[in-house]
Amino acid sequence: MADTNVLSKRMSKSVASMLPHIAATIAERTSKGPAKIDLGTAENWLLRPELLEICKDAIAQNLTAEEFSYPRGFGGDPKVLEALASFFNSYFYPSVPVQPDHVVVTPGVSSCLDTLLYNICDEGDSVLVPAPYWSGFDHHFHFRSSVTVIPVYSSTSHLSPTSSQSQRGHLTASLTSSLIPALTHTYSSNESPARIKALILTNPHNPLSLCYPPSVLRQCMSWCQKRGIHFVSDEMYALSEIAAQYGDMNEAVVPFVSALKVAGMKAEDLEGELLLPTEEMAEIDRSKVHVVWGMSKDFGSSGIRLGCIITQSNPALRTGIALLNSTTVSSLPSLFTATLLTSRRLPALLALNTARLTTAFSILRTHLKRWDVKFIPPTAGLYVFAKLGKNIKTQEGEDEMVRSLKREGVLVAGGKSFKVRIIEGKGWVRIVFSVPEEVLLEGLRRVERCLFAGSRVSSQKGGEEEEE
């Protein structure tokens, strides 16, 4: 155990709390035993052959002596800022066009959120995050900025009992108008509501792989504006679309709509239930609306550390974020990103990504259906949230299931990692399907051996069901 007494008070608690997790992760990655299939880490492998080719071409054709100098510009290299602005205008449909000086680049989306919170929060402040959510936020928000996450749990009690959303239960309630009264309750019942500085949500959702309806996003913005807090939309899975082709959901599929577009929408433009009164749906002050995005998920480049924040009416905040990230993004990720986002191949790559994600999901879906496993049908993302532990009722049972799968050689992320409560049920896991097909099929074979040894599930290429 490392001696944390040599550290500052600010870091000693964080290091002490994370050491066991770090040690376990290092031991896992350096283990000399049989290789494990990782269906727990949200990485997209499906475009890597094409991305590798583009990256090599970018270096071979565009690398100059200038890339060996400090980055030019403030907030990012001018070429990558221009490429990002054009990209957002083409694919995120902002109501106000994104300009290069609206964007600041950072070494990844986690860094975006960290430096954003460092700028808008003081030590000991809090942020609201709708649950379920990736529990890594708890650690990343606290390490440097000393910000606490307050989970917001929504209920279906505000929905019609006959609505399909109500019937899908508490897990997806945060993606409905039920989020608004849940925010109000959580905010007003907090001991220090004045120290709550932001609402942060992930759209498309992690781990549910669903998108927030524009009506819910717009109400959240108005709710934040009334209380003078920031609205932050993490849109790192924005273009990881899965083609709708299955009848797993009774209601219409909600497509991704960026906060950059929603900020300009009026109440009369919105479809769906509105719980806020009309007078509270006034024009949005964009100085407290921020979007983050990065290369990690949509373009399968989690090792190419480049993320960005778009904030369109807050020059002081952009300056603060740029100061904290000055020279932190190296020239090569900027070169690759600018080349990719301005490539004529980009539309075809995005279409290919959707096609491959859809095919990969169909393989997983076939197995889940055969196992009679309940799951949330995804519309955008790299994974499915599924109740592999069909009869599990306790956290201990869920933990043991995850350990059993690990012993079988397959890794998944348990529901505990996403703040799933007893009321939503135990036995849920996030299963990543954006891996090479042979890896996915082998991982599913191991899941079957561990949990569903008696089920007839095809291991054929493509995961097609066997004929009866």
Image (cartoon, grey):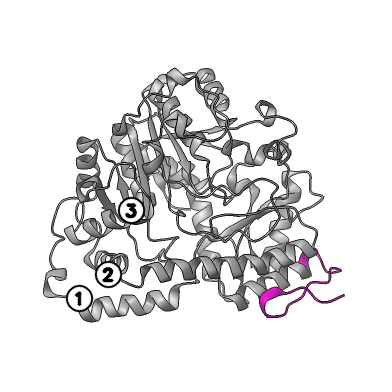
**Which of the image's four quarters has the C terminus?**
bottom right
**Residue type, mark 2 in image:** Thr
Q: Mark 1 sits on what residue?
A: 62
Inspect this view and state whether residue 286 appears: yes
Q: Amino acid at mark 3?
A: Phe
Figure check: 119 above or below 6? above
Does label 3 or label 1 sit earlier along the sequence? Answer: 1
Residue assigned mark 2: 339
Tell me what residue is drawn at x 56 percent, y 60 percent: 242
- Element marked by disc 1: helix
Give amino acid for label 1: Asn
Q: Dot 2: within a 10 Å radius of its alpha carbon, few (fewer than 14), some, or many (20 or more) residues? A: many
- Answer left or right for 309 relative to 101: right
Asked whether, in this view, residue 315 is left or right of residue 37, the answer is: left
Asked whether, in this view, residue 185 is left or right of residue 119, the answer is right
Give the distance between the C-alpha atoms of the residues marked 2 and 1, in whole angstroms.
8 Å
Tell me where residue 131 appears, x and y as whole percent. Answer: 57, 38
Question: CA gap, disc 2 to disc 3?
Answer: 15 Å
Magenta part of the chain:
450-468
The secondary structure that most of the magenta stretch takes on is loop
Give the quarter of the image for residue 176: top right
The residue tagged 3 is 88
Residue 325 position, x and y percent, is 24, 50
Give the mark toward the camera: 3 or 1.
3
Residue 304, percent from left and from top: 35, 65
